[in-house]
Amino acid sequence: MEKGEEVMDYDTKLIDRKIIAEDTLALSFEKPEGYEFQAGQYCFLNLPDKGFQDKRGLRRHLTIASSPLEKELLFATRITGSAFKKTLKELSTGETITIEKPLGKFTLPEDTSTPLVFIAGGIGITPFSSMIRYASDVRTKHTITLFYSNRKPEAAAFLGELEHIADINDNIHIIPTMTNMDASARQWDGLIGRINPSMIKDNSQEWDRADYYIAGPPKMVDGIRDVILEMHISKERIHIEKLTGY
């Protein structure tokens, strides 16, 4: 490697792996020396061959769910039948994988004067987990309202942790809503139903001057973007990140 050339690949070891919500796997890896990223970015993971193969292969990108200030890199993903996901489930603690440099512009803005409305559907919570953890760690002056939609509480990854952050940080507000409580075995006293203009306006005092960040499955992101546009929010103030479940 020539002097000054950027390192593209980093080896990292698995520290921990656990189920954190229904069909949702979280994996913590060592943060390689010199690995820096912005809250909300993603990176490509290259996994070892454990006998699972398909056309998409063993190189995929996942959003980093941890704060840039944390000593570990945290990823969370829905469990599916792809070769990549099957291999993730088979990784052993201490096993090494390769990650690539961080990518993406769906990040926490430097400007703290404009209120932020985050809207997450399902595993779309991962970039917001990173942003909110960082904003809380640093005590930035961002005013953040997160609307977090899931089918049921059992599927809501990171919800308890994010609500705890909101409890100790007056600038952060978490508004979860469930869309299919008939499928849940838990009691739920919060909001029910899909995110709509009334829900946003009732729970975000500065909704009309906020910038909007939407992350989740492509169909959900497109639908919510249309909802925000109907609220007469200009498209320049809407930022999206579409996440697939492969």
Image (cartoon, rainbow, N blue to C red):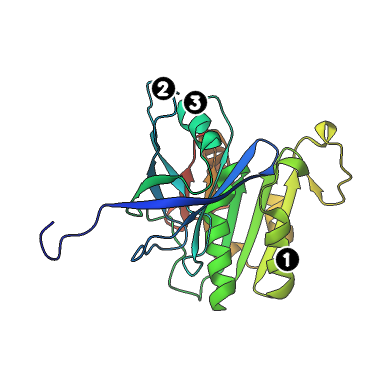
Q: What residue is shown at x 82% (from left), y 52% (from top)?
A: 190
Instruction: For label 1, count other residues whose C-alpha is less than 10 Å away and answer few (under 14), some (14-19) or many (20+).
Output: few
> On the image, numbered disc 2 is attached to which residue?
53
Residue 144's quadrant in the figure?
bottom right
11 sits left or right of 172 in the view: left
Instruction: For label 3, count other residues whose C-alpha is less than 10 Å away and answer few (under 14), some (14-19) or many (20+).
Output: some
Q: Residue furthest top?
A: 54
Compared with 120, 112 (above or below) is: below
Task: Of the two numbered discs 3 and 1 on the same chain, state the one appearing first in sequence.
Answer: 3
Q: Nearer the viewer, mark 1 or mark 2?
A: 2
Secondary structure, mark 1, is helix
Compared with 70, 17 (above or below) is: above
Amino acid type, residue under disc 3 in the picture? Ser
Q: What residue is shown at x 14% (from left), y 65% (from top)?
A: 4
Q: What residue is shown at x 73% (from left), y 57% (from top)?
A: 160
Of 132 and 83, the residue lying toward us:
83
Residue 193 is at least partly visible in this image: no
Secondary structure, mark 3, is loop
Amino acid type, residue under disc 2 in the picture? Gln
170 sits left or right of 99 in the view: right
Q: Position of residue 1 (x, y in %)?
A: 13, 56
Q: Position of residue 81 (x, y in %)?
A: 54, 24
Compared with 100, 84 (above or below) is: above
Instruction: For label 2, count other residues whose C-alpha is less than 10 Å away and answer few (under 14), some (14-19) or many (20+).
Output: some
> On the image, numbered disc 1 is attached to which residue?
164
Q: Position of residue 22 (x, y in %)?
A: 70, 38
Q: Position of residue 225 (x, y in %)?
A: 53, 45
Q: CA distance from mark 2 to mark 3?
A: 8 Å
Task: Of the two numbered discs 2 and 3 on the same chain, state the one appearing first in sequence.
Answer: 2
Amino acid type, residue under disc 1 in the picture? His
> On the image, numbered disc 3 is attached to which residue?
82
Of 96 and 74, the residue lying toward us:
96
